[in-house]
Amino acid sequence: MSKAMRVGIVGGGIGGVALARALRLRGIDAHVFERASAFGEIGAGVQMTPNAAKVLKGLGVGEGLERIGFLPEAMVGRNWNDARELFRTPLREVCPRIFGAGFYHVHRADLHAILCDGIPADRVRFNVQCTGVEQHGERAVALFSDGTRFEADLIVGADGIHSAVRDSLWGKTDARFTGHMCWRALVPVEHHPLPFVSPDASFWMGPKAHIVTYYVKGGAAVNIVAVNESAQWVAESWTEPSTREELLGAYAGWHPNIIRLFERTDTSQIFKWGLFDRDPMTSWSQGRATLLGDAAHPMLPFLSQGAAMAIEDAYVLAAALAHHAGDCTAALRAYEAERLPRTARVQLEARERGRTYHLSTPEEQRQRDLAFQQQQAKDPNAVGIKAEWVYEYDATRCEERFDTLASVA
C-alpha cells in the first residue's frame, strides 16, 4: 500500500529534500514544491553532529558527507579577550567511537546538493508559493498562489520558520524577539589552516555575546556565526545585509584572532538577522497534513541542531509511513510520539544556552568556567556544551521504538 501513497512536500530546503529522498528510498511517491526558481542554499556553514551524520548515512549519502565535510579536531570553549581554553572536547577521534558517527562541518549548499541528488525533475515544481492546505476526507490539498492545487494522501509543511502550512493548520502566531541578533559570514582560505583559526569548533564566550568559528568546504573557508545581545529589533531574515564595520564595531575589544578574522570578511557576504523564539508545539498534525523542521519546531542556533532536527524528522516520518503501510493516522501518531519530546527538549535547551554563553559578570563567568573545568577533569571526553544526549540519539532505529509504542498501546 505504501508504494501507492503520494506525498506533497511544501518547501525544498534541507528538511524538504531530505524527506523526498527518505520517501523515495521507501518506495513512496514524493513531490516537492519550492517557491524559489531553483534548488539552492545560502552561503553559510552548518554542523552535522553525530546524530545527523547517522541519518545521512541511512539516507545513502554517507560518502557524499565524507567528501564535502570537514572533521574538526575538537570542540573548544575560549575566553573572549585572552583566548584561554575553558574546555576542550575531542571530536575527530572520539565521536565515531562514543556516538557511532563523526562530527562534520559542511557548507549548507553542499549538504543540500547531496540530498537533492537523484530527485527526479518531474517530481519538483519551482516558483510556486503555498497559501494553505485544505482537507477532504482522506485527502489533503496544497493550495498555491498561482491558482494551482496539489492533492495527495499527505501534505507536509517543510516550509520553514514562516510556514504557510503551519499557519493554515494552526493559525498565525507571532514569535518573540529574544533580544539577540546574529551575524553570519564566510571567509575564504587560500592556505589551510589559518594561523589564527584553529581546526576546531571554537566557541568564544564573552559578556552578552558569543562567536562560533569553524572550517567548511574541506578547510577552504571559515564559517562565522556571531551572536550579540541587542535591544534593537532586527529582521527575522537570513539575508539582511550588514557590513564589516558593523561586525567589527560589535566586537571591539575582543581577542586579536577574532579581529583578524573579521577583517578578512567581505561586506557583500556579511548578513545579520534577529533571533526569534517560539514555544514547543504539542502537536504538528491535523488530518492528512503535518509539519517538519523549522515549520514544526523553530529553534535558536545555540546547540547547532536546526538542520539536524529537520533531517531526523525526515527519516522518522518516512519510516513511520512505510512502517504503517500507508495508514496516515497511525504513522503520524508514531512520528509525533518519536519526535515531539526530542525536538521540544532541544528547543528549550538551546534557549538556555543563549543565557549561559553570555554571562556578563566576572563572578558568573568564573562559576561557569569552573564548572567546565570540573566536568573536563571528571571526563576528558565530555562535551563542553553538555550535548551528549543530543549526539547519542539514532533516528535510524526509530522502527524498533514504533514496535514498542504499538505493544504498549
Image (cartoon, rainbow, N blue to C red):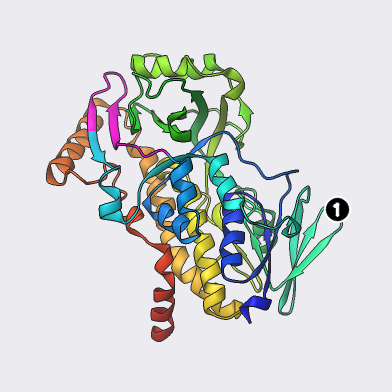
Indicate the quadrant containing the N terminus: top left, top right, bottom left or bottom right.
bottom right
Q: Residue at (58%, 81%) from the top-left corner?
A: 325
Total tally of numbered discs in the picture:
1
User: Could you tell me residue 107's position as x and y percent?
Assistant: 51, 38
> Can see residue 180?
yes
Where residue 108 sits, quadrant-wise, is: top right
Q: Residue at x 64, y 63 (%)?
A: 156
* Residue 188 within the segment the image draws in magenta: no
Residue at image point 62% right, 60% down: 20
The kind of residue on which mark 1 rests is: Asp
Instruction: Give neighbour class at mark 1: few <14, some 14-19, many 20+ (Cα, 10 Å).
Output: few
Q: Which residues are magenta?
A: 70-86
Q: Position of residue 155 (x, y in %)?
A: 68, 66
In this view, which residue lies farthest toward the right?
147
Judge whether residue 85 is colored magenta: yes
Seen from the viewer's position, the closer of residues 340 and 58 is 58
Residue on which the image places disc 1: 146
Q: Residue furthest left?
A: 377
Image x and y of residue 214, in percent: 40, 32
SS category of the residue bearing label 1: loop
